Image: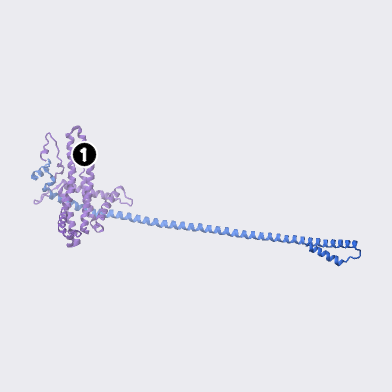
Amino acid sequence: MASSATDSDAAAHGGEQAVGMPQLDFDTWASQIFWAALALVLLYQILAKKIMPRIAGALEDRHHAIAGDLDSASTLKAKAEEAQGAYQKALSDAKARAHEIAEKNRAELNVQIAEANEKAEAEIAARTAEGEERIAAIRAEATANAREVAGETAKAIVDKLAPGSADPSAISAAVERALAERGMV
Amino acid sequence: MASSADGEGGLNIHPMDQFIIKDWIPIDLGFVDLSFTNSAFFAFLAVGLVSLFLWTAMSGSSLVPSRMQSMAEGIYEFVRNMVRDSCGEAGMKYFPYIFTLFLFILACNLLGMLPYSFTVTSHFAVTVFLALSVFITVTMIGFMRHGMNFLSFFWPMDAPAVMRPVLAIIEVISYFVRPVSHSIRLGANMMAGHAVLKVFAGFVGAMGVFGVLPILAITGVTALEFLVAVIQAYVFAILTCVYLHDALHMH
């Protein structure tokens, strides 16, 4: 370290061989610091004036582009959701209409069925009434026949038992009484 | 050390020779020697390579970055986030300085890994200059921002009243030790690694066939040295951020 002068001499002549630590040869400090400072100032100028704005600009541009893309993606998503909503609405509308039509058809059919039932019941009732009428007529005829037969038979019996004493009004009254007893009037 | 330089017979190892400053263009101003040296050359080579790399990377700048562009942007964002995380938005004003400092040290460290090259940052002259300029700048920022209130940075308010004067002395000492540790850490790391490589390389010739062992060691140490080159540049930059944070926000 003491021999810094001879050291730098040796360095100058190319036959370099370090004596101690070259780091502690303070004769070289001024030159090292001067050139390092100059290099740093130069690098700072280049970076701050030329290069950093470009990098910052590139990053900014990308940031904006990504933000824009995200924006348009979200609008597209909103549109897609809107379209899906419209589709869902159309679908549910169609379902509702189909249901409505089915209900209407069913109601119409029910009405028709009820009408047909009514008609059939009316017909059945009419026929029943007709049948009952005929039965009643047959019954009345049968009763009349029975009255006549019973009257004549009773008159013939009375004539045979006591000729000439037949009272037609008494006989018919008795017949009526007998018929009433049998529930035929 | 001079005795080990006697190359006759024994080990012929000169681990410190690689650090010799060589005058390439002597410029002696009489009162001061500002010769253009190998150190100056490699400092400017670092500046040139950094500028060339970043300029080339960003010249075809596009929305989808090329490999080089994403490297350049990656370094930029790395340092920017480092400054923002440790100093907040107030520190972003000083981001260009820290970016310059980081890239300069990184480039000098990595250039030193080339065989026959010179490691600018292995000299305390340079690291002391860098650390002192950070120290002085940061202290000035502290006083410009807070005025005389900046002195309260050394007065620990959360400590018991009796302890405060003692702690204040310790705070002041540790504050002034900052540039020392800041510069020695970088310079010693770069110097030691390179010296170790040279020492191991000297063993290769002396050990004959077993010279393969130091070669393996050199391979490992070289890989380690690349790591150290990057880490020390990072450490220097992050410590600068930490000091800047103290000046801006006072704890």
Chain A shown in which color?
blue
Count up the numbered dots.
1
**Figure quadrant of the C terminus of chain A:** bottom right
Closest to the observer, A3 or B163: B163
Seen as rendered, the residue at the extreme bottom is A169
- For label 1, the crowd category at 10 Å Cα-Cα, with few meaning under 14, some 14 to 19 and many 20 or more, is many
Residue B92 occupies which quadrant of the picture? bottom left
Which chain appears purple?
A: B
Q: Is residue A96 left or right of residue B30?
A: right
Q: Which residue is mark 1?
A: B218
Please tell me whether residue B79 is drawn above or below residue B7 in the rendered image: below
Q: Give me the residue at 33% from left, 54% from top.
A: A62
Please tell me whether residue B154 is drawn above or below residue B189 in the rendered image: below
Residue A77: give x, y in percent of width and height: 42, 56
Task: Name the residue type under label 1.
Answer: Ile
Give the structural element (helix, strand or loop) at label 1: helix
Q: Give me the residue at 57% from left, 58% from top.
A: A102
Residue A76: give x, y in percent of width and height: 41, 56
Please tell me whether residue B155 is drawn above or below residue B197 in the rendered image: below
Q: Is residue A174 left or right of residue B17?
A: right
Q: Is residue A132 left or right of residue B21?
A: right
Residue B184 at least partly seen? yes
